[in-house]
């Protein structure tokens, strides 16, 4: 094979260079791609590029002579989607069009697999294809124990544009949480840098000593309270760090109800479910084909029960909107 220039298609904009190579040359390993970039054999518009370079439509990628593809390593195929869970996910669709699918993710369902995780949303996405040419794609994440709005792309082109919107902080995220205690002041801004630490099994997040960690900012306001024991907060993260809202609420002295990881015994008062009371209530994001979509999710059952016990009244979700 000789050197071959290839032009990045419109539906490939914003994907990483290594992923572009794997799409066109599926036999290439990640190590081989990085080696070709490191030695300058791969170039984008005539310039050296690293594997993580984001491509733009119309750019020219220099494809050098490629090493012979290694035989594929046998992989354990995931089991077919559980029909009952697939049916439940289909019922949880909040918004759908040709480019975008928005789900109300249930509590307890991981978005992706990992050690000891056999059942996860990523393994169920084929069941949500619904006649589309491509399987839906993840463009952002929610924690296993966080319920609410999760956006999926229905094509590679839509995924690239949505991922760029999340990276560019063009997406407005609104969360609801029930916390133990009443924050003072009742509204404000939490600016506490965070670092990743090692837990017993998975990494955790903690406030950084001397402000040396990654910037993490959350706006909050109290929507209602039950004496001094509980409060219903609206949280708007300005950054997207792992477990940011959970750590920030604990840093206020008002951990999220059910969050034993960051709130300890304070987060587990008797008489309430020991389940994280955190909901991704709403997302507003640029639609890949124009306009802006706003979608809201309902309270999950355990939060609805807690709201009833505490006398909080939440309005029903507004219908999805996509003004031009």
Image (tube, rainbow, N blue to C red):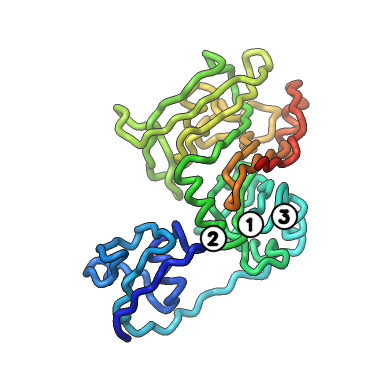
The x, y position of residue 107, in whole percent, is 66, 45
Callout 3 crowding tier (Cα within 10 Å): few <14, some 14–19, many ≥20? some
Name the residue that disc number 1 marks.
99
Q: Hey, which quadrant is residue 6 in on the image?
A: bottom left
Tell us which disc is closer to us: 3 or 2.
Answer: 2
* Residue 114 visible in rendering: yes
Name the residue that disc number 2 marks.
157
The x, y position of residue 310, in whole percent, is 73, 22
Do the residues under discs 2 and 1 have CB atoms within 8 angstroms? Answer: yes
Instruction: Identify which residue is drawn at 54% across, 60% down.
Output: 157
Which of disc 1 and disc 3 is earlier in sequence?
A: 3
Q: Is residue 194 above or below residue 191?
A: below
Which of disc 1 and disc 2 is earlier in sequence?
A: 1
Find residue 89 and name its label: 3
Residue closest to the eye, 190 or 25: 25
Instruction: Identify which residue is drawn at 52% across, 14% down.
Output: 184
């Amino acid at each position: 094979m000789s050197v071959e220039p290839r032009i990045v298609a419109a539906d490939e904009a914003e994907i990483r260079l290594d992923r572009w190579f794997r799409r066109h040359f599926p036999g290439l390993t990640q190590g081989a791609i990085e080696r070709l970039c490191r030695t300058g054999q791969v170039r984008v518009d005539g310039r050296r590029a690293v594997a993580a370079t984001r491509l733009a439509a119309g750019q020219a990628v220099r494809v050098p002579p490629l090493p012979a593809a290694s035989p594929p390593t046998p992989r354990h195929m995931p089991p077919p989607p559980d029909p009952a869970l697939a049916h439940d996910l289909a019922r949880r669709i909040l918004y759908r069009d040709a480019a975008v699918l928005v789900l109300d993710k249930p509590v307890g369902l991981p978005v992706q697999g990992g050690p000891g995780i056999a059942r996860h949303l990523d393994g169920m996405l084929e069941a949500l294809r619904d006649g589309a040419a491509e399987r839906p794609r993840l463009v952002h994440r929610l924690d296993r124990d966080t319920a609410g709005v999760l956006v999926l792309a229905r094509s590679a082109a839509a995924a690239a544009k949505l991922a760029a919107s999340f990276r560019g902080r063009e997406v407005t995220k609104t969360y609801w949480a029930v916390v133990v205690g009443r924050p003072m002041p009742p509204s404000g801004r939490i600016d506490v840098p965070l670092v990743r630490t090692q837990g017993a099994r998975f990494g955790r997040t903690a406030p950084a000593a001397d402000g040396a960690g990654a910037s993490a900012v959350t706006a909050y306001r109290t929507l209602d309270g039950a004496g001094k024991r509980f409060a219903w907060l609206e949280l708007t993260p300005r950054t997207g760090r792992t477990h940011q809202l959970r750590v920030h609420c604990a840093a206020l002295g008002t951990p999220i109800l059910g969050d034993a990881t960051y709130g300890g015994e304070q987060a587990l008062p008797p008489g309430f479910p020991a389940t994280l009371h955190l909901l991704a209530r709403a997302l507003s994001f640029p639609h890949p084909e124009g306009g802006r979509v706003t979608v809201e999710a309902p309270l999950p059952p355990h939060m609805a029960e807690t709201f009833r016990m505490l006398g909080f009244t939440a309005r029903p979700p507004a219908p999805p909107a996509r003004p031009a």
